[in-house]
């Protein structure tokens, strides 16, 4: 069983305007009111498009000091911009290990923020730079590039924030990612991962938080909406499509 670096994310509620985005997103309202605790090394955030997953993972990465455009902790990738509204306000309660990592020089903050939209550019820009990974990911397929990057980057204790890392991956590559995440979680790292993939969400020992209209709830894998949707579709796609296409 691994440990956590970040125990809790919360907001100082005094000067928040709950009428303004992003606090109008139910999951973020919930975060502002209750905070968000982390007890296990791997946490998945699932929920419909627009439910606030990216807003929250970006803010977590920023609060920990990971670059919001991706890249290793303590480095800058692409043009930097200020923190997001939520990232500015979010506070983290860290464990001793997490504190030690954050207190040190920025460079010692091991971790990685893989942002969904910029992932490909990031891979191309970083390949063959010292400290990253070898092999030019431009010459690899999208999925191969990701797996190469994951192999090199998901290797040691740190805080890893991933936004839909499955987007380029086949079913079997997704399984390989599950294996890496599982290993990482047991090695003293912490992972927070937004995903639509029931394959990733099944990683053993992970906490799954569903973002929805009522805020954030911890849900067992078999009770997830994405699992139900995939089950129903795989079981009888034509019956699902009949409703849609009629
Ligand atoms: N900078 C912004 N200003 C206002 N609304 C935004 C901004 N960025 C995202 N949104 C909105 O916030 C909501 C949550 O977005 P997001 O966190 O990206 O959801 P998810 O990652 O779960 O699909 C969406 O309705 C989106 O349109
Ligand atoms: Mg998103």
Image (spheres, helix red, strand yellow):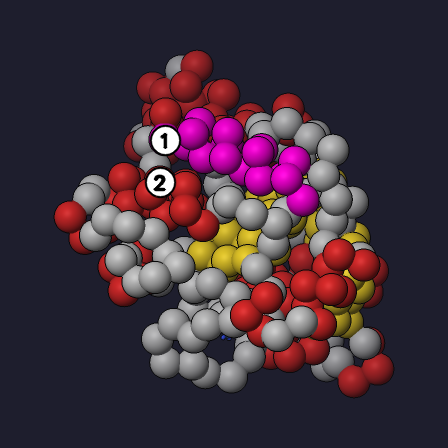
Give me the residue at 61% from left, 43% from top.
Answer: 44
Task: Read off the magenta span.
Answer: 173-188
Q: Ligand 2: does it lie within 8 Å of the C-beta at label 1?
A: no
SS at badge 1: helix
Q: Residue furthest front?
A: 130
Is 32 located above or below residue 12 in the figure? above
The question of residue 185 being in magenta is answered with yes
Q: Residue at label 2?
A: 147
> In screen coordinates, is 48 left or right of 130?
right
Instruction: In the rendered structure, find residue 220 and report the number of the disc placed on it.
Output: none
> In screen coordinates, is 234 left or right of 178?
left
Give me the residue at 43% from left, 14% from top.
Answer: 235
Pick whichever, 22 or 147, lies toward us. Answer: 147
x and y percentages locating residue 121 in the rendered image: 28, 62
Instruction: In the rendered structure, find residue 173 and report the number of the disc placed on it.
Output: 1
Q: Who comes first in sequence, dot 2 or dot 1? A: 2
């Amino acid at each position: 069983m691994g440990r956590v670096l970040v125990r809790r994310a919360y907001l100082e509620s005094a000067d928040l305007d709950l009428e303004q985005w992003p606090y109008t997103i139910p999951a973020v309202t919930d975060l502002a009111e209750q905070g968000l605790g982390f007890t296990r090394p791997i946490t998945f955030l699932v929920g419909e498009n627009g439910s606030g997953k990216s807003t929250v993972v970006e803010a977590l990465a920023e609060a920990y000091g990971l670059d919001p455009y991706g890249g290793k902790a303590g480095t800058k990738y692409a043009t930097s911009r200020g923190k997001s509204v939520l990232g500015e306000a979010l506070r983290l309660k860290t464990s001793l290990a997490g504190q030690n990592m954050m207190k040190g020089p920025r460079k010692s903050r091991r971790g990685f923020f893989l942002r969904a939209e910029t992932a490909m550019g990031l891979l191309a820009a970083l390949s063959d730079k010292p400290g990253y990974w070898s092999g030019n990911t431009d010459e690899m397929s999208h999925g191969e590039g990701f797996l190469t990057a994951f192999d090199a980057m998901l290797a040691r204790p740190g805080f890893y924030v991933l936004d839909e890392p499955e987007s380029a991956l086949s079913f079997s590559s997704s399984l390989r990612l599950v294996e890496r995440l599982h290993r990482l979680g047991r090695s003293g790292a912490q992972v927070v991962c937004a995903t639509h993939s029931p394959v990733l969400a099944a990683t053993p020992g992970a906490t799954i938080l569903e973002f929805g209209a009522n805020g954030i709830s911890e849900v067992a894998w078999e009770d997830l909406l994405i699992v139900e949707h995939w089950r129903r579709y795989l079981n009888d796609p034509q019956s699902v499509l009949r409703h849609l296409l009629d």
